[in-house]
Each structure stands twice: as C-alpha cells, then as structure tokens.
Image: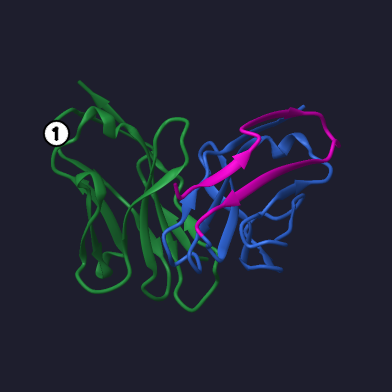
Amino acid sequence: EAQVTQNPRYLITVTGKKLTVTCSQNMNHEYMSWYRQDPGLGLRQIYYSMNVEVTDKGDVPEGYKVSRKEKRNFPLILESPSPNQTSLYFCASSLRSSYNEQFFGPGTRLTVL
Amino acid sequence: AQSVTQPDIHITVSEGASLELRCNYSYGATPYLFWYVQSPGQGLQLLLKYFSGDTLVQGIKGFEAEFKRSQSSFNLRKPSVHWSDAAEYFCAVALSGGSYIPTFGRGTSLIVHP
C-alpha cells in the first residue's frame, strides 16, 4: 500500500531535549516536506527536499533541521525543543514538486513542556 | 505578499443541502490550485486540483471546484452534503516556475447537521 508513515504519532517531551520525528514514503517520490499545523494558522511548511541531499527552508524553519540521505526517508530534528514548537506535524511527499498532489502522513502531535 | 484566504472559519449545513467553500488567492500569475480535506485525526487528502484548461474541475467524493481568474477564486462546491463530509477543508496554491513552497489557507471547518 502506498503510504507516508511518521513516528512517533504522539510525543511529550521537555524543553531542550533533542528529538527526531521520522518520516518514510514507499512511493519513490522525489519531493518531501514537513509542515506544522496550528489552530487558526493552517499548515505552514518547515522544510522541503527536492531529492536526496537537496533540502531547503520553508516558511518557518527556525528551530528545526532535516536531512535527506535516502530517497524514502526525511527525518525532522528538533535539537533543542521549546514550548512554541508544540504543534501537530505532518510529513508529505509528492512525485516531483509541490505542483503535484502531496500525500500526507497521519501526523505527529508534539507537546514540549 | 502571496496569500491564500479562506474567509469562512466554520460553515454549518444540513445533510442534503448544497455546499460552497470559498478560496481566494493573491498571486501575480495563475497558480496551481488544490483543495485538500482533513478528517478528524487524519492527514490531508487531495480532493481536486487545477493546473490549466477547463475551469470547472471534478474531484473525488462528489466535489467540484471552479477557477475564476477575474475573481482570483477557486471555490469548492458539492450539490448534496453527507454527514461524512464533516471535516476541515484546506485550499492551497503553488506557483509555477517559482518557489516550491506551497501556501495553504487557514482552513474551513465544515459541520453537518442531520
């Protein structure tokens, strides 16, 4: 089954404790991206990747890192999480770019205390 | 600045009634346009998209949208709403030949009364 998976689905952590949210897709998509969803703000893109070893900032990259060492994986790293990063995070992938249909993962709800 | 506006935060309709969700964008050129739906606790799923050609686009689940260049709008419609359509709906745009960062609207929450 074609899908985007994220882990963990729920995470509660404390300020400053490094964490990684994994994202994997099995559709051989070139484009992958991370979004955060906050009430009243919709989805905002954090980082995107056009292909392996090619990443770029989205609208709200501060406090986040990403890497794309393999085509299927696109982990999101918070090296020193803060409470304002409490949010619902979505990973998405598409064939080549944001012009194509994006397939979304189920989301990761992160709480930073 | 580029923007996408969904003016209605919440919309309430009765089951069987027609539905129209509004989306306006502010871009210099015609962008790629999308409508996504997010059911409770789920990720987003594409309903339909417009790139070029016929301005009336058919999507999944009985939805359609009409692109109106003169009004910079891409409104989503459904002639008869089902209770299972209750969800959050997002309009999104992506610019051709420009940034690869898509812009999403803030979303419209659809409530369906029996």
In the foreground, A72 or A91? A72
Residue farthest toward the front in the current orientation of the protein: A1
Which region of the structure is painted magenta? A1-27
Q: Position of residue B9 (x, y in %)?
A: 39, 38
Left or right of residue B32, residue B12 in this image:
left
Tell me the chain of label 1: B
Amino acid type at circle 1 is: Ala
Is A19 covered by the magenta stretch?
yes
Quarter of the image where the C terminus of chain B is located: top left
Q: Which chain is blue?
A: A
> Which color has been applied to chain B in this rendered view?
green
Q: Position of residue A35 (x, y in %)?
A: 58, 49
In the foreground, A100 or B28? A100
Q: Position of residue B79 (x, y in %)?
A: 13, 43
Give above or below for B69 relative to A77: below
Q: Position of residue B33 (x, y in %)?
A: 36, 62
Look at 52% across and 66% down and name the residue there: B1
